[in-house]
Image (cartoon, grey):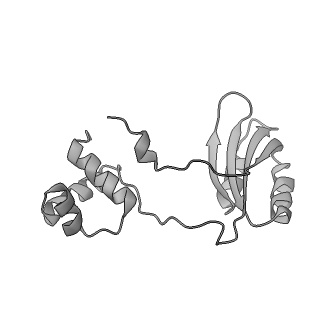
Amino acid sequence: MELDPIDMQILQILSKNARIQWKDLGEQIHMTGQAVGNRIKKLEDNGIITSYTLLLDEMKLGLSFTAFVIMYMNSANHHPFIHFINDRKEIIEAHRISGKGCYHLMIKITSQEELNHLLNQLLKHGNYSLNLSIQQVKKQHPLTAYNK
C-alpha cells in the first residue's frame, strides 16, 4: 500500500492520541469522520496499523531498571532460547543482530535480584554482556523515522 500525505497525517495524529474520535480527527485534516474511518480501516487491513497501545510511566510502575543484554549463543539451535525469551515478561524487546553477539535484549525490571535471576537463566543459553541504563535521553515514536 502506498501511503499518501493524508494517510501520514492520520498516522501522526493517531500516534499522539489513538483514542481520538474519527470526527475530531477529520476536523483536523478537513475530512468527514466516515472518510477518516474508511482510511483507518484500510491502514489496518493492509497491516500498516497493527495495534493500538498505551504509554505508561515505567518508574511509577516500579520498573526502575532498564538493562541491555547482548547474548552470545552456545548452540546453533536458537529455538529454545527464542521460546524462553518469548515467555519472559521482563524481556520487552529482542532483536537478532549482526556483528558482535547474536541477540540484543531490552529488559525492564524492578530490582537487582530480579535481574540476577534472569541473568542466571540466560546462562543456560549462552554468555552475555550487560549494560544498565543510567538515563533515557531520547525516546520517540517510530513514525518520526518515516521520511517520505
Q: In this view, does 4 lie to the left or right of 63?
A: left
Query: Could you tell me residue 144's position as x and y percent?
Result: 41, 44
Numbered marks: total:
0
Query: Could you tell me residue 43's position as x and y percent?
Result: 28, 52
At horizontal 78% and vertical 38% (from top left) the residue drawn is 73
At horizontal 73% and vertical 30% (from top left) the residue drawn is 100
Q: Which of 28 and 20 lies nearest the eye of the viewer?
A: 28
Q: Is residue 116 above or below residue 60?
A: above
Q: Which of 130 and 48 lies nearest the eye of the viewer?
A: 130
Query: Could you tell me residue 28's position as x and y percent?
Result: 21, 59
Q: Which of 34 and 71 lies nearest the eye of the viewer?
A: 34
Q: In this view, does 43 lie to the left or right of 132?
A: left
Query: Could you tell me residue 37's position as x and y percent?
Result: 21, 62
At horizontal 83% and vertical 53% (from top left) the residue drawn is 119
Which quadrant of the view contains residue 30? Answer: bottom left
Most extreme residue toward the bottom is 61
Q: What quarter of the picture does the C terminus occupy?
A: top left
Q: In this view, does 17 lie above or below 50?
A: below
Q: What quarter of the picture does the N terminus occupy?
A: top left
